[in-house]
Amino acid sequence: MALLTPVTDEDGAPFWEYTARGELRIQACAAPDCGELRFPPRPCCPHCQSFDSEWRLMSGRGRIWSYVLPHPPLLPDYAELAPYNAVLVELADAPRIRLAGNVVAAPDAPLNSVDPARLRIGAAVKVAFTEIDGVAVPRWLLERG
Amino acid sequence: MLKDATAIVGIGQTPFAKQLPESEKTLACRAILAALDDAGIAPSEVDAFASYTMEETDEVEVAKAIGAGDVTFFSKVGYGGGGSCATVGHLAAAVASGQATVGVAWRSRKRGSGPRPWKNTAVQLPTPGQWTRPFGLLRPADEIGMLARRYMHEYGATRDHLFNVALACRNRANQNPAAMMYERPLTREMYMTSRWISEPLCLFDNCLETDGALACVIVSAERARDCRQKPVYVHSVAQGLPAQHHGMVNYWNDDPLSGPAWTAARHLWKQADFGPEDIDVAQIYDAFTPLIPLSLEGYGFCGRGEGAAFTEGGALEIGGRLPLNTGGGGLSEAYVHGFNLINEGVKQLRGVSTAQVPDAATCLVTAGEGVPTSAILLRS
Ligand SMILES: [Zn+2]
């Protein structure tokens, strides 16, 4: 099975370097009076235009903001798993930052390993990582197993 | 300066079908020549072209093929379906400012060719693809479905509301012999039992795969008086790329449910002599049914969160509060990245639609919502 792995760019690369270490980090402005988080990563801060940035460690907790259950026609390796879930997780540490992801039963479990009936907008989730083709990809586990 | 300074004086289209034998270039030429013939203007007089991205045929090819004269203005607007109305806006600006005299906007599309990035397994878009595609958000239906579920959760919208949208478009297509869904009625049972595409969106929440081309011709209001057809004036135009907006996955700001329509609408109404309550008929971009309630709110036909309820009681049908997509729209006439909505708006204001709104004098036409968008107000 070959799910897509992220095609990164210069701005996004650090995110994936941190996930390889098991860390969920989000880009933040490093200007002394600003510090605003931003996502997706980009060269400069939309609030103060500073080009200095740092990557801030997140708690890895969040809530489901919304989700879909894709059915075919899909790329072959996703069609095999359909219907699976794709979710948007609003980070507890950064309410306007919502990461796309998948809720799974265990870090390495397939995208369709959780019964869709258990998904709810607002449900609490926590991050875990799984390796796909050498890339550490975030996954989400329901807080109440 | 732009208000009513130009008019659409010609429209043309090819047949719409799941598959047409001719190439996109040939279809484009057929639609453009039909539009020029409709206007009574010789191809050699055309000196401006406008199209939008994900268009396979360049203006160089089209100009050469139809026998255009020297071209002094050409423009290609970004973001696919978000650019449909901007083509009219760009040509209106070019003609009104004296950069050109006869402008042609067109769209030609075949379902089997052209860029469909979500179908390609080998090539991924970089940002924002790296933040969505690995997680199986592969298609526009998945990306909009995400907003649709949140919208339903926040505002009590239901699948019946989405059905109201699909039904209004289908009913109009049933009146339009050129529509893909002519003589193919839709029932609530068909809708509710159809297969899922991306829950909460089902088959009938999605637009049609279509081959076909359309075009329109724009000249100054002064020149329009001498053309064959009753002029349809370009009253107001706007594009919309909101602050901190992100492609079709606008998930990273305060309110992802307020899309580019809101930005385009503010500028559109500011330029206009009338408001949403004065619109006789609307052609609103309907790649997916949830775009209609979101757009109804964005363009000010109702308040925030009221777009779904607005569709109740036949509001979108002929005789309703706001007759919608009277040719059948992208959901049921043809999905040609929204250009059929422009031509249908012109037909309504000429009084020749197959689902004519009596005495229609004002029409809103919008481009793709969710992506950087555009809109026009037409008046007779
Ligand atoms: Zn800053």
Image (spheres, coloured by chain):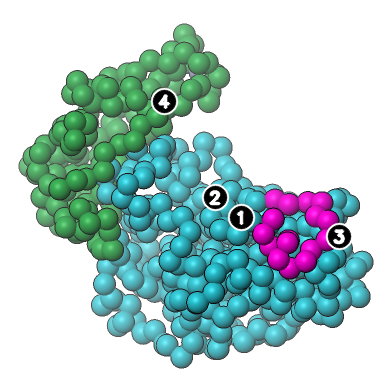
Chain colours: A green, B cyan
Quick check: B163 above or below A76? Answer: below
Q: Count the numbered circles shown.
A: 4
Q: Alpha carbon of mark 4 to alpha carbon of mark 3: how far?
A: 45 Å
Work out whether mark 2 precedes mark 3 in sequence or the reverse, and give the earlier one: 2
Q: Is mark 3 within 8 Å of ligand 1?
A: no
Q: Residue at x 42, y 88 (%)?
A: B184
**Amino acid marked by disc 2:** Tyr
Q: Is tag 3's residue or tag 1's residue first in the polypeptide sequence?
A: 1
Which span of residues is magenta-colored?
B60-75
Query: Which chain does the residue under circle 2 lie in?
Result: B
- Callout 1–callout 4 Cβ contact below 8 Å: no
In percent of width and height, residue A140 lies at: 18, 38
User: Seen in the image, is B297 located left or right of residue B350?
Assistant: left
Q: Earlier in the sequence, mark 2 or mark 1?
A: 1
| Label placed on residue A11 | 4
For label 1, count other residues whose C-alpha is less than 10 Å away and answer few (under 14), some (14-19) or many (20+). many
The answer to whether residue B115 of the structure is visible from this angle is yes
For label 2, the SS is: loop
Give the class, few, some or many, for how many residues have Cα within 10 Å of label 3's Cα (few <14, many ≥20): many
The residue carrying mark 2 is: B79
**Image spot of residue B127 (x, y percent):** 42, 37
Q: Is residue B372 above or below residue B187?
A: above
The residue beneath circle 1 is B52
Q: Position of residue A21 (x, y in %)?
A: 19, 20
Where residue A129 sits, quadrant-wise, is: top left
